[in-house]
Image (cartoon, grey):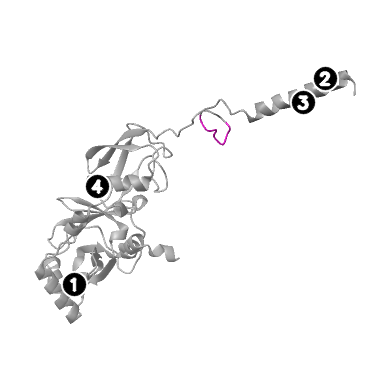
Amino acid sequence: MDATTTLETVSSLEQNCVTEEKVDKPSDCKIPKTESGDCENKAETPSEVIEVKVVYNKNKYNVNAPSNTTIADFKKQLQGLVGVPVSMQKLMYKGLLQDNQTLISSGITKGAKIMLVGSTLNDVLAVSYVTKQDVAEAEKAASTKEPLSKQKIHRKVLDKGIPDDVMPGIKSKNESLPPVPLSGMLNKHSGKVRLTFKLEADQLWLSTKERTEKLPMGSIKNIVSEPIEGHEEYHVMGLQLGPTEASRYWIYWVPAQYIEAIKNAVLGQWQLF
């Protein structure tokens, strides 16, 4: 090997050593690399907290929540604020909001107005409130098996006659629910009752002179009805709002042609067909 070849070999070895030193040299980047290979620290940006207005029973509430909050979690927040159980809440913003949506995916931004419909447990209990005398009379009637229209608990209302403004009844005929509320009927106190079916919100609005209760369809456990003897074009109808028969809310002079449609709308029997 001549001198020239020896020098080229030494030079080549030196270059290899420099290359290896560069490969082994620690990176100047002080922050561990992310999966994308960037040296910058890409910490997740926290979700923006937005303030929205929730309207419930003509009252307005300012509510703050992160924009990525799910509707299900937002309902839990509202339960503590207004007292409406999550299962009885319906939230409306450009349509009915679904539990798996988030505020931001629903298009809700700062200052948005969200409508809340639903009844508190106290509201439901107030509608279905019965006295000890009512319970005693109901038990007595159940044991005697008399027709509803013959029982003392109902006679005190029926004996006053057909209300002047009740809707016309049709015997032995079934019709769909009318586009207007059912009105002119009476409750056990002989007070006027109006029924409005909000099918898009899955609610039955039960209105008296004093108040309107927005009952979720699911809170109504059962419906019983019988024709009124001598006026078979009308029925006595009971909405069971609690676990026992004593929690029935009685309505008198219900037009017979709408009974099946009422049961189908509230109890969901149409789903069987």
Label 4, on which residue?
80
Label 1, on which residue?
149
88 or 235: nearer the viewer = 88
Question: What quarter of the picture does the N terminus occupy?
Answer: top right
Mark 1 residue element: helix
What amino acid type should be assigned to the residue bearing mark 1?
Answer: Ser
Q: Position of residue 184 (x, y in %)?
A: 20, 56
Q: Residue at x 31, y 59 (%)?
A: 218
The magenta region covers 31-37
Question: What quarter of the picture does the C terminus occupy?
Answer: bottom left
- Whether residues under marks 2 and 1 lie with C-beta atoms below 8 angstroms apart, the answer is no
- Mark 1 or 3, closer to the camera: 3
Q: Earlier in the sequence, mark 2 or mark 1?
A: 2
Q: What count of labels does the image hold?
A: 4
Q: Earlier in the sequence, mark 4 or mark 3?
A: 3
Q: Residue at x 33, y 38 (%)?
A: 65
| Number of residues whose C-alpha sits closer than 10 Å to that of mark 2, classed few (under 14), some (14–19) or many (20 or more) | few
What secondary structure do most residues of the magenta stretch adopt?
loop
| Number of residues whose C-alpha sits closer than 10 Å to that of mark 4, classed few (under 14), some (14–19) or many (20 or more) | few
Separation of residues labelled 4 and 2 (CA atoms) = 85 Å
What amino acid type should be assigned to the residue bearing mark 3?
Answer: Leu
Mark 3 residue element: helix
| Number of residues whose C-alpha sits closer than 10 Å to that of mark 3, classed few (under 14), some (14–19) or many (20 or more) | few
The mark found on residue 13 in the picture is: 3
Indicate yes or no whether the magenta region holds residue 34.
yes
